[in-house]
């Protein structure tokens, strides 16, 4: 796999430094590259209600979507750990939604060293739903019924 790009690593490190992790002190930064080449960074943001905590990878992808992009071409994740940090299961599913199976995910230790794998290797059995067809402008839709009227 390709070595992490310096621009992704720098963005992820900067995001990691901004992480809000007062409960775990586990700071994570992530950077994703969109199809445009633009980089979007995210950090983990914890909450006292732990289920409301959001990971760095998802925050980076959500920033990409908020900016109008829909395709992730490369990902880098870095923590304060001595070993390479892989995305959690929820983040893997979100990455699979917006990245091709061949998109590269760089998992880095605190120094920026680590390993790189394709999205398909992180989540080989991705959950997918059919995407709804866009509604036609001006078209009237009948409400579904439970039986004959």
Image: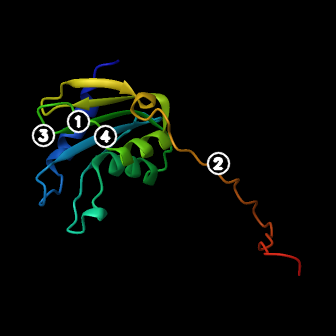
Left or right? Give the position of 96 relative to 80.
Answer: right
Badge number at residue 80: 3
The location of residue 101, given as percent across then percent down, is: 49, 30
Task: Look at 18% across and 25% down and name the residue there.
Answer: 113
Q: Earlier in the sequence, mark 4 or mark 3?
A: 3
Q: State how far apart marks 1 and 2 are (Cα).
A: 31 Å
Q: Image height check: is 12 above or below 44?
A: above
Q: Earlier in the sequence, mark 1 or mark 2?
A: 1
Task: Look at 22% across and 60% down and name the residue there.
Answer: 46
The image quadrant of residue 140 is: bottom right
Q: State how far apart marks 2 and 4 are (Cα).
A: 25 Å
The residue labelled by disc 1 is 85
Asked which secondary structure carries label 2, the reply is loop
Left or right? Give the position of 16 relative to 131.
Answer: left
The image quadrant of residue 128 is: top right
Is the residue marked by circle 3 packed among few (<14), some (14-19), or many (20+) residues within 10 Å?
many
Task: Look at 28% across and 33% down and name the residue there.
Answer: 8
Q: Is residue 4 visible?
A: no
The location of residue 77, given as percent across then percent down, is: 26, 37
- Work out which quarter of the rendered image holds the N terminus and state it: top left
**Residue nearest the viewer, comparing 138 with 126:** 126
Asked which secondary structure carries label 4, the reply is loop
């Amino acid at each position: 796999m390709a070595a992490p790009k310096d621009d992704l690593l720098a963005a992820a490190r900067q995001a990691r430094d901004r992480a809000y992790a007062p409960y775990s002190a586990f700071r994570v930064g992530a950077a994703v590259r969109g199809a445009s080449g633009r980089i979007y960074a995210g950090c983990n943001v914890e909450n006292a209600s732990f289920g409301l905590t959001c990971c760095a990878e998802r925050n980076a992808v959500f920033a990409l979507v908020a900016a109008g992009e829909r395709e992730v071409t490369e990902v880098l994740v870095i923590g304060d750990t001595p070993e390479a940090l892989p995305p959690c299961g929820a983040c893997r599913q979100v990455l699979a939604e917006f990245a091709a199976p061949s998109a590269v995910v760089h998992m880095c230790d605190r120094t920026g060293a680590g390993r790189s794998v394709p999205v398909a290797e992180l989540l080989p059995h991705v959950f997918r739903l059919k995407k709804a067809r866009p509604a036609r402008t001006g078209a009237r839709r009948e409400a579904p019924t439970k039986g004959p009227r």
